Amino acid sequence: MSLLDTSTWDGRIFLDGWRAGRGGTADALEPATGHALGSYGVATAEDVAEAAEKAATAQRAWSATSPEDRAAVLRRAGDLWHEHAEEVEDWIMRESGAIKPKAQLETHIAANECYEAAALPTHPAGQVLATNDDRWSFARRKPVGVVSVIAPFNFPLILSIRAVAPALALGNAVLLKPDPRTAVCGGVALARVFEEAGLPSGLFAMLPGAADVGAAVVEAPQVQVVAFTGSTAAGRAVGESAARNLKRVHLELGGNNALVVLPGAEVAKAASAGAFASFLHQGQICMTTGRHVVHESLYEEYVAALAEKAANLPVGDPTSGTVALGPIIDEKQLKRIDGIVQDAVMHGARLAAGGSNDGPFYQPTVLADVATDNPAWTQEIFGPVAPVVAYSTIDEAVALVNDNEYGLSVGILGEVGTAMRMADRLESGKVHINEQTVMDEANAPFGGVKASGNGSRIGGAEANIDAFTEVQWLTVRPEIADYPY
């Protein structure tokens, strides 16, 4: 039987095994065709409450499990992503509209996330502290208990596993709420992998559902930490709820990322980087380049080169052949993208390429001469749209980059010395010199500032340990101390 054989999970959630959700079922849809690929179970707040109770009970035994045994489960999970890569990738392509290379990237990073997490159980778990008293003094790391993970549709596997794997490895239980639009490749697939990897029952629950389920996985009293990836608006609501319930929350939110092209940069290479950064996965990535900031000496040449790239990128059903862009995730998002593009043109932007759609497939679009107060420049579009503006001085470029509510990722293309000095002045969680803005590795800290989140909370041992453990002060005396009472 294959990993994702529908007879295992069709119409079910994963809560101490596969079972019907109290919310009934929903169809997993293929955005390229509108066809139903299967059905998944829908959870309710009552399901979440039950899952949280079971998770809290199971977690106590899991946290006492030897580091070697916990690491073995994570290593086996990593192996399973490789063994079943082709099957999982097919689901990513069909359910999220990804092209094959993007789907392959997801399974590759999923495996690496598990391998990196497998090293966490044997990582140093605290410090020996200096003390003025006749005792030993320690600061030790302990699992937080139950972690809720809320993941979006655009990179459904990566943006789930990067929190799920380290949280489990460090001795926690996890409640996962995947986006309903990618409940299989971003939810069912994880449940099946950890089930096959030998994760003990009750430690992991997969709970697709609407906003009420999202609220429940945040508010459940057993949950101590919430890892949320999604829009800034939704992240604010999650943060407010977590604060009200005195829970730690790790927010990885939206981005309107800038790619700066310095004077003297090689235009052909810069335009290639810019096209990749704006059009990969239809621009539906938080790190997508949404603002191209180009020196005036290269501006027209860059716009022409980028427009030529856009005009020659094939768009269509990812399963039908070799395409560079697949479908927009749903009709609502498609209309939003087109509305922003048409508004920009109406207010003076020059349409250098694209600006239309064929069904769910939006053409890669280049907008030149965009006003810097237009929504096409100020907002996160989450579509294949590349707005371009010119600058004259480095100070002006820095101001253009920083004058935005987001601060997730910036790319700088050109002379390294200038780029290094510029990087020191940028308000961004990530800066990539002579690379574009879309970048992720399992061992690298990931996060943004300003409206893009509350810092690097995921990625690498240090960030993951800080995210999913609590510090406990522990002292030990050779005998009972004397007190003055």
Image (cartoon, helix red, strand yellow):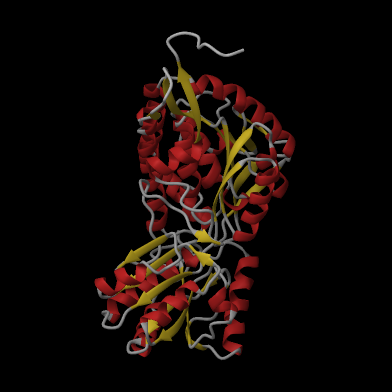
Q: Nearer the viewer, residue 284 or 69?
A: 69
User: Is 121 situated left or right of 46 in this image?
Assistant: left
Residue 203 seen in this snapshot: yes
Residue 357 seen in this snapshot: no
User: Is 36 situated left or right of 103 in this image?
Assistant: right
The extreme front residue here reads 484
Residue 310 x, y percent position in the rendering: 41, 78
Is residue 153 shown above or below 54?
Answer: below
User: Is 467 situated left or right of 237 in this image?
Assistant: left
Residue 217 x, y percent position in the rendering: 66, 40
Q: Nearer the viewer, residue 293 or 201?
A: 293
Image quadrant containing the C terminus: top right
User: In the rendered picture of this protein, how many numbered marks are placed on residues?
Assistant: 0
Q: Nearer the viewer, residue 465 or 348?
A: 465
Is residue 129 shown above or below 447?
Answer: above
The extreme top residue here reads 479
Is residue 423 shown above or below 20?
Answer: below
Residue 26 x, y percent position in the rendering: 67, 47
Residue 216 x, y percent position in the rendering: 70, 41
Q: Examine the image and state in which quarter residue 14 appears.
A: top right
Q: Examine the image and state in which quarter residue 348 appears.
A: bottom right
| Residue shown at 44% from the left, 37% from the top | 465
Q: Nearer the viewer, residue 139 or 360?
A: 139
